[in-house]
Image (tube, grey):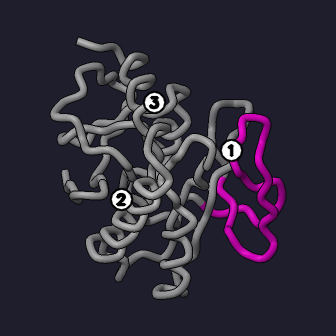
Amino acid sequence: MASKQILREVYLSKRQFLSDDEYEFRNQKIAEHFMSSIDLDHVNTVHVFLSIVAKKEVDTYRIIDLIRKFNSEIDIVVPKTLKTGHLKSYILNDNCIVEENKWGIPEPVDGDLADDGLIDLVLVPLIISDKHGDRIGYGKGFYDRFLETVPKAKKVGLSLLPNLDKIEFIEPTDIKLDACITPNQVYHF
Protein backbone atom coordinates (compact mmCIF):
# COMPACT_ATOMS: atom_id res chain seq x y z
CA MET A 1 0.00 0.00 0.00
CA ALA A 2 1.53 3.30 -1.12
CA SER A 3 1.52 6.46 0.96
CA LYS A 4 0.04 9.74 -0.26
CA GLN A 5 3.54 11.07 -0.98
CA ILE A 6 4.46 8.03 -3.10
CA LEU A 7 1.15 8.27 -5.01
CA ARG A 8 1.81 11.98 -5.50
CA GLU A 9 5.27 11.31 -6.97
CA VAL A 10 4.13 8.42 -9.20
CA TYR A 11 1.17 10.26 -10.71
CA LEU A 12 2.99 13.57 -11.13
CA SER A 13 5.60 11.59 -13.06
CA LYS A 14 2.95 9.88 -15.21
CA ARG A 15 1.45 13.25 -16.03
CA GLN A 16 4.85 14.73 -16.95
CA PHE A 17 5.52 11.84 -19.36
CA LEU A 18 2.40 12.48 -21.43
CA SER A 19 3.43 13.45 -24.96
CA ASP A 20 2.39 16.91 -26.11
CA ASP A 21 -0.18 15.36 -28.48
CA GLU A 22 -1.63 13.14 -25.74
CA TYR A 23 -1.71 16.06 -23.29
CA GLU A 24 -3.57 18.16 -25.88
CA PHE A 25 -6.02 15.33 -26.66
CA ARG A 26 -6.81 14.68 -22.98
CA ASN A 27 -7.35 18.39 -22.30
CA GLN A 28 -9.75 18.62 -25.23
CA LYS A 29 -11.75 15.64 -23.94
CA ILE A 30 -11.95 17.13 -20.42
CA ALA A 31 -13.19 20.46 -21.80
CA GLU A 32 -15.82 18.67 -23.89
CA HIS A 33 -16.95 16.59 -20.89
CA PHE A 34 -17.11 19.71 -18.73
CA MET A 35 -19.42 21.49 -21.15
CA SER A 36 -21.64 18.44 -21.74
CA SER A 37 -21.77 17.01 -18.19
CA ILE A 38 -21.75 19.93 -15.77
CA ASP A 39 -25.04 21.79 -15.49
CA LEU A 40 -24.27 25.50 -15.58
CA ASP A 41 -27.90 26.65 -15.74
CA HIS A 42 -28.01 27.80 -12.11
CA VAL A 43 -24.34 28.72 -11.75
CA ASN A 44 -23.52 32.38 -11.28
CA THR A 45 -19.89 32.14 -10.13
CA VAL A 46 -17.22 29.55 -10.92
CA HIS A 47 -13.94 29.34 -9.03
CA VAL A 48 -11.22 28.08 -11.41
CA PHE A 49 -7.60 27.30 -10.58
CA LEU A 50 -5.15 28.59 -13.16
CA SER A 51 -3.06 25.78 -14.62
CA ILE A 52 0.61 25.33 -13.90
CA VAL A 53 1.74 24.56 -17.44
CA ALA A 54 5.17 23.25 -16.34
CA LYS A 55 3.41 20.57 -14.22
CA LYS A 56 1.08 19.60 -17.06
CA GLU A 57 -2.02 20.37 -15.04
CA VAL A 58 -5.37 20.23 -16.79
CA ASP A 59 -5.66 23.25 -19.10
CA THR A 60 -8.25 25.34 -17.30
CA TYR A 61 -7.76 28.25 -19.71
CA ARG A 62 -9.61 26.18 -22.31
CA ILE A 63 -12.54 25.74 -19.89
CA ILE A 64 -12.50 29.45 -19.01
CA ASP A 65 -12.73 30.29 -22.72
CA LEU A 66 -15.68 27.93 -23.17
CA ILE A 67 -17.53 29.37 -20.19
CA ARG A 68 -16.99 32.89 -21.53
CA LYS A 69 -18.12 31.87 -25.02
CA PHE A 70 -21.26 29.92 -24.08
CA ASN A 71 -22.14 31.25 -20.61
CA SER A 72 -20.85 34.81 -20.58
CA GLU A 73 -23.15 35.75 -17.68
CA ILE A 74 -21.15 33.51 -15.32
CA ASP A 75 -18.51 35.26 -13.22
CA ILE A 76 -15.15 33.50 -13.11
CA VAL A 77 -12.98 33.88 -10.03
CA VAL A 78 -9.40 32.67 -9.58
CA PRO A 79 -7.34 31.99 -6.45
CA LYS A 80 -4.32 33.61 -4.88
CA THR A 81 -2.40 31.67 -2.24
CA LEU A 82 -1.77 33.47 1.02
CA LYS A 83 1.06 32.96 3.51
CA THR A 84 -1.60 31.94 6.04
CA GLY A 85 -2.27 28.76 4.05
CA HIS A 86 -5.58 30.03 2.69
CA LEU A 87 -6.86 31.19 -0.69
CA LYS A 88 -8.25 34.57 -1.64
CA SER A 89 -10.48 34.81 -4.75
CA TYR A 90 -10.29 37.51 -7.42
CA ILE A 91 -12.76 38.16 -10.23
CA LEU A 92 -11.13 37.29 -13.55
CA ASN A 93 -11.93 40.46 -15.47
CA ASP A 94 -10.04 43.31 -17.16
CA ASN A 95 -8.86 44.58 -13.74
CA CYS A 96 -7.30 41.24 -12.82
CA ILE A 97 -3.54 41.15 -13.31
CA VAL A 98 -2.17 37.59 -13.28
CA GLU A 99 1.50 36.70 -12.86
CA GLU A 100 3.38 33.54 -11.90
CA ASN A 101 4.43 33.45 -8.26
CA LYS A 102 7.79 32.06 -7.11
CA TRP A 103 6.43 28.48 -7.36
CA GLY A 104 5.30 28.97 -10.95
CA ILE A 105 1.62 29.23 -10.02
CA PRO A 106 -0.29 31.81 -12.08
CA GLU A 107 -2.29 33.96 -9.68
CA PRO A 108 -3.72 37.46 -9.34
CA VAL A 109 -1.42 40.17 -8.08
CA ASP A 110 -4.09 42.86 -8.33
CA GLY A 111 -7.76 43.13 -9.17
CA ASP A 112 -11.26 42.99 -7.74
CA LEU A 113 -11.80 40.70 -4.76
CA ALA A 114 -14.61 38.17 -5.09
CA ASP A 115 -17.21 37.24 -2.50
CA ASP A 116 -16.55 33.54 -1.84
CA GLY A 117 -20.10 33.20 -0.54
CA LEU A 118 -21.34 33.62 -4.12
CA ILE A 119 -19.32 30.72 -5.54
CA ASP A 120 -21.56 27.95 -6.93
CA LEU A 121 -18.95 25.71 -8.54
CA VAL A 122 -15.27 25.07 -7.77
CA LEU A 123 -12.90 23.40 -10.22
CA VAL A 124 -10.47 21.62 -7.92
CA PRO A 125 -6.85 20.87 -8.85
CA LEU A 126 -5.55 17.41 -8.08
CA ILE A 127 -2.83 14.94 -8.91
CA ILE A 128 -5.00 11.82 -8.75
CA SER A 129 -8.47 10.94 -7.48
CA ASP A 130 -10.51 7.82 -6.90
CA LYS A 131 -13.94 6.47 -7.75
CA HIS A 132 -15.33 7.63 -4.38
CA GLY A 133 -14.64 11.36 -4.65
CA ASP A 134 -11.36 11.40 -2.73
CA ARG A 135 -8.33 13.18 -4.18
CA ILE A 136 -4.65 13.69 -3.64
CA GLY A 137 -3.47 17.23 -4.18
CA TYR A 138 -0.07 18.79 -3.73
CA GLY A 139 -0.12 18.25 0.03
CA LYS A 140 -0.42 21.78 1.40
CA GLY A 141 -4.16 21.67 2.14
CA PHE A 142 -5.00 24.99 0.45
CA TYR A 143 -8.05 23.61 -1.33
CA ASP A 144 -9.34 21.54 1.59
CA ARG A 145 -9.31 24.68 3.76
CA PHE A 146 -10.90 26.71 0.96
CA LEU A 147 -13.63 24.14 0.27
CA GLU A 148 -14.64 24.24 3.94
CA THR A 149 -15.53 27.93 3.42
CA VAL A 150 -17.82 27.25 0.43
CA PRO A 151 -19.85 24.23 1.60
CA LYS A 152 -22.74 24.81 -0.82
CA ALA A 153 -20.51 25.00 -3.91
CA LYS A 154 -20.29 21.96 -6.17
CA LYS A 155 -16.73 20.59 -6.14
CA VAL A 156 -15.50 19.23 -9.48
CA GLY A 157 -12.05 17.73 -9.86
CA LEU A 158 -10.20 17.68 -13.16
CA SER A 159 -7.79 14.82 -13.87
CA LEU A 160 -5.73 13.94 -16.92
CA LEU A 161 -5.34 10.41 -15.55
CA PRO A 162 -7.97 7.73 -14.87
CA ASN A 163 -9.37 7.57 -11.35
CA LEU A 164 -7.97 4.97 -8.96
CA ASP A 165 -10.35 2.44 -7.42
CA LYS A 166 -9.67 3.66 -3.87
CA ILE A 167 -7.23 6.01 -2.14
CA GLU A 168 -6.52 4.55 1.29
CA PHE A 169 -4.92 7.54 2.99
CA ILE A 170 -7.86 9.85 3.49
CA GLU A 171 -7.77 12.18 6.48
CA PRO A 172 -10.71 13.82 8.28
CA THR A 173 -9.72 17.21 6.82
CA ASP A 174 -9.86 15.93 3.21
CA ILE A 175 -12.93 17.28 1.43
CA LYS A 176 -14.63 14.95 -1.06
CA LEU A 177 -15.41 15.94 -4.62
CA ASP A 178 -18.95 15.96 -5.99
CA ALA A 179 -17.69 15.00 -9.45
CA CYS A 180 -14.44 14.34 -11.29
CA ILE A 181 -13.85 14.81 -15.00
CA THR A 182 -11.25 12.63 -16.70
CA PRO A 183 -10.60 12.33 -20.45
CA ASN A 184 -12.55 9.06 -20.61
CA GLN A 185 -15.28 9.47 -18.02
CA VAL A 186 -17.17 11.83 -15.76
CA TYR A 187 -17.67 10.49 -12.24
CA HIS A 188 -20.48 11.81 -10.04
CA PHE A 189 -20.30 11.05 -6.31
The label nearer to you, 3 versus 1, is 3
Looking at the picture, how far across and down is residue 89, in whole percent? Answer: 65, 56
Upstream in sequence: badge 3 or badge 1: 3
Is 101 part of what is drawn in magenta?
yes
111 shown above or below 67: above
13 shown above or below 95: above
Looking at the image, residue 103 sits to the left or right of residue 145; the answer is right
Q: Residue at x 55, y 76 (%)?
A: 65
Looking at the picture, how far across and down is residue 119, in whole percent? Answer: 50, 63
Looking at the picture, how far across and down is residue 60, in whole percent? Answer: 52, 61
Instruction: Give me the C-alpha separation between circle 3 and circle 1.
Output: 18 Å
Three-letter residue code for mark 1: Ile
Looking at the image, residue 165 sits to the left or right of residue 50; the answer is left
**What segment carries the magenta color?**
89-115
Which label number is shown at residue 13? 3
> Of helix, strand and loop, which one carries label 3?
helix
Looking at the image, residue 137 sits to the left or right of residue 50; the answer is left
Residue carrying label 2: 154
Is 40 part of what is drawn in magenta?
no
Three-letter residue code for mark 3: Ser
**Quadrant (top left, top right, bottom left, bottom right) of the N terminus:** top left
> Of helix, strand and loop, which one carries label 1?
loop
Q: Depth check: 21 or 71 in front?
A: 21
Q: Residue at x 48, y 76 (%)?
A: 44
Three-letter residue code for mark 2: Lys
Instruction: Give me the C-alpha separation between circle 2 and circle 1.
Output: 23 Å
Q: Residue at x 36, y 55 (%)?
A: 156
Upstream in sequence: badge 2 or badge 3: 3
